[in-house]
Structures are given as structure tokens and as C-alpha cells.
Amino acid sequence: MAGRMFEGKVAIVTGGALGMGRATARRFGEEGARVCVADIDRDGAQSTVDVIREAGGEAFACRVDIAVEDDNDRMVAETVDRYGGLDVAHLNAAILGELADFFEGGVANYDRVIAVNLRGCYLGMRSVGRVMRRGGAVVAMSSAAGLKGWDLNAPYSASKHAIIGLVRSAAPAFAARGLRVNAICPGTVNTRMFVADPAEDAIVPSENLEMPPFAGLATPQHIAELVLYLASSRAAFITGAVHTADGGQMATFVS
């Protein structure tokens, strides 16, 4: 199909088995990218690949523990070996961890959340940035919890605050390679992380996306569309930036 935004490009999406990662991988596929769908749940990643292929796209599944350096390097190497290069990476994979009072939460939970969410993002940025073709872009996933504290989940909030610092700090090094890196802070999204029975698989033509209520619940596609914009040449002057997509949740107190 002519005119697709990522025709001839190669993308990696981590956390691609479910939710925002799955929606983003599908949208990259619809827009012509060849996609590595990476997740610790390989069967889930393969399910996303199957949907992309059924829609006429090209993709493969890769099992990755993003907290492991060698896994990140292997993910990138497999992508480059298959498709000849890399242009885009959406570093989306994360875990919520346990909800607990600050003084009651376990240190093991803290260590795991930081290892996956922060270390995993750091390792992913390094692995993809070293091989990405000039003009490429990385979109890292922070959170509204990266902009304010969360009393019942300090480790998660701390990890998401740190991703913002990581992206800002990395921007000059990425720019020196002809690359961009940005962060997104979603509000509450209709995914299994926050909703018991999410309707997370619906993809509609982007021009038909509806606006949820103020500070309401986004669909995964709402976030995916922002990822695609930041990964595209339309955002060529945007790097080292933080983009809030929360339906106004952070904007004001609502009485």
C-alpha cells in the first residue's frame, strides 16, 4: 500500500504481547514496518505476530527478558539479521509490582521493579541505539506515575520518574548518532495492568479515534498513535522530551 508511514522501516516493540505494546506493534505493521514483537511471554508475542501477518504485515516473535543485557543484544541482532537494519524502537515492557504501603513493601519487589522497568529501559536504549540507522527514533514508556508520586507503589513511580531522567540524559548521545529519543507518560489505559477485563484489542482507523471523558480511560491505540508520531519523521525536531497522554488527568484538580 503506497504512502504508509513506515514503509521499508524496521521496528522493535518490547512488551508486545499485550496492551499498548500489542497495539503499537499492530499499528507499525499496518503502516508498513517489519516488526520484532518482543516479550518475556513468547506465546503472547507470537499471538501479536499472527494478527500482524493476518493483516498483511511482516513480523516475528522474540522472547526477551529486558532486565538481561544479553537478551537485549540478541533481540537487536535477530532483528538486524532478519531485516537488514533497525529504524524504530518502542521500549514499552514494564511490570507494576506489588501495591503496598511505603513502609510495608518488600525489598525484593523493589529490586525486581527497578530491574525490569529502569534497567530494562537503559539496556534496551543502549542495545538499539548502537545499531539504529541514522534518522531513527526510540520511544520509551514512562507514566503519569513518573510525573507525580504514587503512595501505594513507590518502586513503580520511582522507576518511571527515572526513565524521564534517562531519556533526557541520553538525548545528546543519540543526537550525535543522528537519532532521537523521547518518553511518553500515559495516564490510565484500558490494559490488564489496570483493568480486570480490558477491551484492549480493538484497532480502528486512526481518524476515527474517539476522545474519552476528561481524565478518563484511554485505549491502547490512543497511546500507540502517539508512539507512531514520535517515531516518524513528522517529529524530526522532537528529542529529549516528555509527552503526557493522560486525557487531562495531570492538568488540574477536578471538584
Image (cartoon, grey):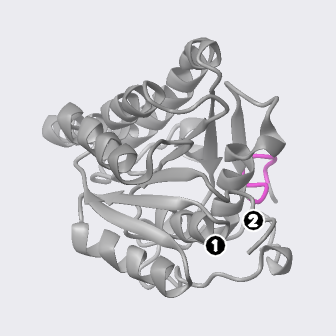
Q: Nearer the viewer, residue 232 or 217?
A: 232
Q: Based on the displayed image, in which of its 4 quarters is residue 107 positioned?
A: top left
Residue found 60% across the figure and 85% down from its top: 202
Residue kind at label 1, given as amino acid type: Glu
Residue most extreme to the left: 108
Q: Nearer the viewer, residue 245 or 83?
A: 83
Main SS, magenta region, reads: loop
* Residue 152 included in the magenta stretch of the image: no
Residue kind at label 2, given as amino acid type: Arg
On screen, residue 197 above or below 239: below
State the extent of the magenta-drawn residues as a range: 247-253
Viewer can see residue 218: no
Report x, y in % for residue 83: 43, 52
Residue found 56% across the figure and 25% down from its top: 167
Q: Which residue is mark 2?
A: 4
CB under 8 Å between callouts 2 and 1? yes
Q: Estimate the spatial distance between the alpha carbons at disc 2 and disc 1, rounded to whole Å.
A: 8 Å
Q: Nearer the viewer, residue 121 or 33?
A: 33
Residue found 63% across the figure and 72% down from its top: 30
Q: Based on the displayed image, in which of its 4 quarters is residue 216 positioned?
A: bottom right
Q: Quadrant of the C terminus?
A: bottom right
Q: Quadrant of the N terminus?
A: bottom right
Viewer can see residue 248: yes
Q: Which residue is mark 1?
A: 30
Left or right of residue 144: residue 238? right
Report x, y in % for residue 199: 53, 85
Report x, y in % for residue 198: 49, 82
